[in-house]
Amino acid sequence: KLTYRSMTGSGVRLAGGTMGYKTKLQPTVADSSTATEFMGASDFGKILLFIRSVMWDLGVPQLAVTVLYEDNDACTSMAMAQKPTPRTRHMDIKYFSLCEWVERDLIKLKRKDTSLNMADHFTKQFGPILFRSHTDYIMGHVPPR
């Protein structure tokens, strides 16, 4: 069935290895790449907060902010500014919880070049060289860049 919803992918790494990943269709059609990336970052933020709470329950204190790598500059800027832009005010308010997590220093969005973004492996088709590079990184065969 044809759909215009975007595909979101994310992966969690801990101590140099991938410990989890998620790929899914977004629940709504986004009208911009910024909206798509922001919705995906918000959903992934929930996963990161859950992992932080599990680590805390296991006795691993969560003293530092958790870094969420993002390849969309507008999405990163919007989260760090902690407010929507005039072009994204139409988005469902639930996605703006990401701004609160940034404000509370639980999550920090950092720029990651698209060619190095491992989440793209879960949502896009790659040529053989880039596919191999991403696979080696996700499997922990090479250190992160």
Image (tube, rainbow, N blue to C red):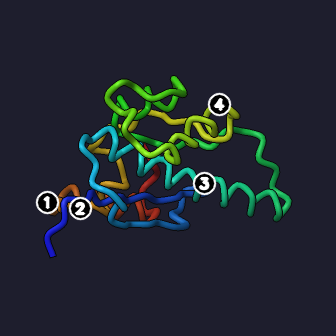
Q: Earlier in the sequence, mark 1 or mark 3?
A: 3
Residues at marks 1 and 2, CA–CA distance in whole angstroms: 6 Å
Q: Earlier in the sequence, mark 3 or mark 2?
A: 3
Badge 3: residue crowd in 10 Å (few <14, some 14–19, many ≥20): some
Q: Earlier in the sequence, mark 4 or mark 1?
A: 4
**What residue is rendered at 67% in x and 40% in y?**
106
Query: Label 2 amino acid?
Result: Phe
Name the secondary structure under disc 2. Answer: helix
Residue 127 shows which numbered tag? 1
Q: Earlier in the sequence, mark 4 or mark 2?
A: 4
Badge 2: residue crowd in 10 Å (few <14, some 14–19, many ≥20): some
Residues at marks 4 and 1, CA–CA distance in whole angstroms: 39 Å
Q: In this orientation, which residue lies closer to the viewer: 18 or 132? A: 18
Which of pointers 4 and 1 indicates the residue nearer the eye? 4
Q: Which residue is mark 2?
A: 131
**CB contact under 8 Å: marks 1 and 2:** yes
Residue 103 shows which numbered tag? 4
Query: Label 3 amino acid?
Result: Leu
Q: Which residue is mark 3?
A: 48
**What residue is rendered at 82% in x and 64% in y?**
58
Which of pointers 4 and 2 indicates the residue nearer the eye? 4
Query: Label 4 amino acid?
Result: Glu
**CB contact under 8 Å: marks 4 and 2:** no
Residues at marks 3 and 4, CA–CA distance in whole angstroms: 15 Å
Residues at marks 4 and 2, CA–CA distance in whole angstroms: 36 Å
Q: Is residue 92 left or right of residue 96?
A: left
